[in-house]
């Protein structure tokens, strides 16, 4: 599962309503996150692995 951060267009591991692989809580700004099937583009630990 992947989730896109719309302000930056970076795709992270995770899903809406959860925490990304790199540790961002998507509940803090739920309007910024949308589930996607796109490839993960975040380079931080936890997302890229
Ligand atoms: Zn990430």
Image: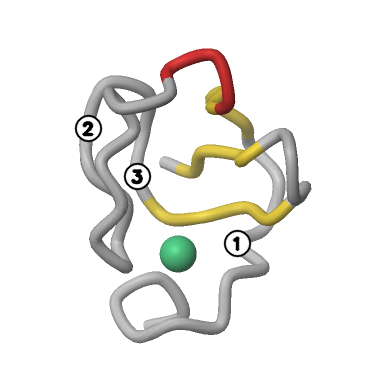
Residue 20 located left or right of residue 39: left
- The part of the image, by quadrant, that contains residue 21 is bottom left
Give the CA separation, mark 3 to mark 1.
Answer: 10 Å
Q: Quadrant of the C terminus?
A: bottom left
Q: At 62% from the left edge and 31% from the top edge, which residue is drawn?
A: 36
Disc 2 target residue: 18
Q: Is mark 3 within 8 Å of ligand 1?
A: yes
Bin the neighbour count of mark 1 within 10 Å (Cα to Cα): few under 14, some 14-19, many 20 and up.
some
Q: Between 3 and 7, which is closer to the camera in this rendering?
A: 7
21 is higher (above) or lower (below) than 24: below
> In which quadrant of this rendering is ligand 1 seen?
bottom left
Residue 2 located left or right of residue 25: right
Q: Position of residue 28 (x, y in %)?
A: 31, 27
| Label annotation for residue 22 | none
Q: Is mark 1 within 8 Å of ligand 1?
A: yes
45 is higher (above) or lower (below) than 21: below
Q: At 77% from the left edge and 47% from the top edge, which residue is drawn?
A: 9
Nearest to N terminus: mark 3 or mark 1: 3
Q: Position of residue 11 (x, y in %)?
A: 62, 52
Q: Residue furthest top?
A: 31
Bin the neighbour count of mark 2 within 10 Å (Cα to Cα): few under 14, some 14-19, many 20 and up.
some
Disc 3 target residue: 14
22 is higher (above) or lower (below) than 37: below
Of helix, strand and loop, which one carries label 3? loop
Q: Quadrant of the N terminus?
A: top left
């Amino acid at each position: 599962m992947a989730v896109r951060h719309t302000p930056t267009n970076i795709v992270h591991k995770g899903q809406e309503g959860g925490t990304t692989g790199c540790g961002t809580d998507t509940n803090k700004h739920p309007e910024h996150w949308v589930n996607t099937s796109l490839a993960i583009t975040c380079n931080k630990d936890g997302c890229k692995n």
